[in-house]
Amino acid sequence: LPLWGAPAVAADTATDYVKTTSQFAYAFQPPSGFDMSNKPLKTHLEEINFISSDTKGYQFGITVDPVRISSLKEFGSPEEVAARVVLAEVNRDGVFDVTLVKDPLLLPDSGGSYLLDYLSQGKRGNKHFVCQISIDRQKLYVLTAQVKEENYAEKEKELFAAVDTFRVTMVDK
């Protein structure tokens, strides 16, 4: 089901990225034309980026981290989590203002995932972010889509279609 009423866009030649370890598992299908990359300095248990080869500043990032809670609900409602994310973002170096674009959502049929949509304004420009946040088996999964605000209208349908493919999958115990 497309999110926020955005019609789904068929991804041509895009392929699923599936990661399964003894600690975590997820799947994601970036749009076609995205290159996978790793950060030189990892700060998370898992960290991977998919960067557009044709639109500068358009990317998806996935992080996985251990947490002490078993569900996002234990951390707060979608609105409370959104407030914490916005506060963390506005405290980043070079960020002047962060605004929620749409009300945060509890995604249906997602096992308790939240969807956040916000705009960050700073010295590096205006960036539109869409995050899908999940907790499963005491692992925090965050998919973050990022695009320059000037490109958002053009990329919105594709971005939401890709975000909608992100799934936390089962890890055999």
Image (tube, helix red, strand yellow):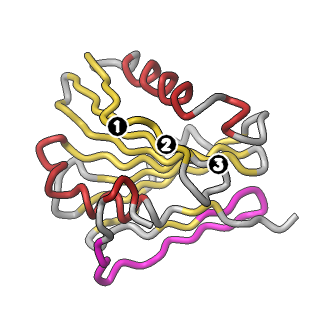
Do the residues under discs 3 and 2 have CB atoms within 8 angstroms? no
Mark 3 or 1 closer to N-term?
1
- In the picture, the disc for residue 112 is 3
Question: As displayed, is residue 142 above or below residue 53?
Answer: above
**Residue in view at x 52 percent, y 23 percent:** 84
What percent of the width, then of the height, locates residue 6? 30, 60
Residue 89: quadrant of the picture:
top left
Residue 103: quadrant of the picture:
top left
State left or right for residue 140 relative to residue 68: left
Q: Label 3, label 2: how many angstroms apart (C-alpha)? A: 10 Å
Crowdedness near tag 1: few (<14), some (14–19) or many (≥20) residues, C-alpha within 10 Å? few
Q: Label 1, label 2: how many angstroms apart (C-alpha)? A: 9 Å
Do the residues under discs 3 and 1 have CB atoms within 8 angstroms? no
For the residue labelled by badge 3, is the local secondary structure a helix, a strand or a loop?
loop
Q: Relative to the observer, which residue lies in front, 69 or 157?
A: 157
Q: Mark 1 = which residue?
A: 102
